[in-house]
Image (tube, helix red, strand yellow):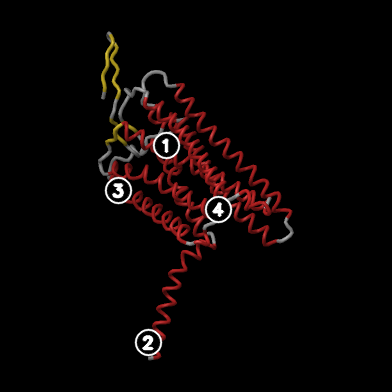
Amino acid sequence: MEVSSLGHNVSISYKEFLLLPFPGITLYRQILFVPFFTTYMLITVLNFLISYTIWREKNLHTPMYVLIGLLLIMNILSTNTVVPAMLLSFLGQNRIPLSSCLTQMFFAYSALILKSTVFVLMAFDRFVAVCHPLRYHNIINRNSLFQLWMVGIVRSSILVCVLVFLASRVQYCKSNRILNFVCEYVVLLSLACGDVSRAQLVGLLVRIGVTFSDVSILLICYLKVLHTALKVTGGTKRRKALRTCGAHLLVALTVYSCGLLSSILYKVEEFNSADSQNLSSVIYFLLPAVLNPIIYGIAVNEIRDCLVMPWRKKVKGQQMLGSQVVQR
């Protein structure tokens, strides 16, 4: 930590912190390692397996499936940014330098904003596919998706860099104990000295701005899809459009709802324990990463068929080999 003095005023700014997730659980703390490690492995395996399947199968190289693959990769990035440090803290290795804390904040928030960008692109893709099918390939193609994705990367980088810069300019003298498993912006600022109202306002504006703009686009796109689908005479096309868009909208709203719940609990922290705030952060960071590969992967017929196809071929090959041996 750094110490600077001017007259009788002495300010101490901590440069190293202690991650203390679920501080209310002190007895048998190591037991928490097991469920969270299991969840971590489940998220990593499921998201990697389905994203690899999308990359491997050429018939899945369409804009919709490419966006699903991007979403699953963002799940892997956000999970691996947050969970390993949490697992180590359960085992007593909970010291984290301020530089590592800010790095974790950058990648965790970047992944979250990019996942929101993917939701918007998926909504736009479904809107064009249902409402303007004849122009779909002219509007949605590799170049347009790449350009929109780059816009999303630039947006997330600028917004997150602003937050990280503000957090790095603050002196932390109240405590070096972070009662959470991740270096969240609002948690760090709660440990700061002096007036941090401007920094808090910027963080609030970033969250509100991203959420409001992205949710507005989502709702507009899916309302247009719903309106168009209800006018379709064919029952099969209508059901397929409504089922696909309904699943997408459900996942997106789940993510935004978890983020809203987390924000509310931090704003009314005097009425909530640190453990409840940790639980809301777990839901926000980990629950979507578990649900996404199930809803966007296993529940999608084309992806599910590609997942089970190698096993079917293997079983069929063993059956053919067995029948040949019997004939001989």
The quadrant in which the N terminus is found is: top left
Q: Residue at x 58, y 40 (%)?
A: 215
Q: Nearer the viewer, residue 250 or 300?
A: 300
Disc 1 from disc 2: Cα separation: 62 Å
Secondary structure beneath dot 4 equals helix
Residue extending furthest toward the top: 7
Q: Quadrant of residue 93?
A: top left
Disc 2 from disc 4: Cα separation: 46 Å
Q: Residues within 10 Å of mark 4 (few under 14, many from 20)?
A: some
Q: Quadrant of residue 221?
A: top right
**Amino acid marked by disc 4:** Pro
Residue position for label 3: 31
Comes first in the chain, label 4 or label 1? 4
In the figure, is residue 97 to the left or right of 187? left
* Mark toward the viewer: 2 or 4: 4
Q: Measured along the vertical axis of the image, is residue 294 above or below residue 116?
A: below
The numbered disc on residue 325 is: 2
Q: Residues within 10 Å of mark 1 (few under 14, many from 20)?
A: many
Q: Residues within 10 Å of mark 2 (few under 14, many from 20)?
A: few
Q: Residue at x 28, y 38 (%)?
A: 94
Q: Nearer the viewer, residue 137 or 257?
A: 137
The numbered disc on residue 277 is: 1
Residue 326's x, y, as percent?
Answer: 39, 89
Disc 3 from disc 2: Cα separation: 51 Å
Comes first in the chain, label 1 or label 2? 1
Comes first in the chain, label 2 or label 4? 4
Secondary structure beneath dot 2 equals helix
Comes first in the chain, label 3 or label 4? 3
Residue position for label 4: 63
**Amino acid marked by disc 3:** Ile
* Mark toward the viewer: 4 or 1: 4
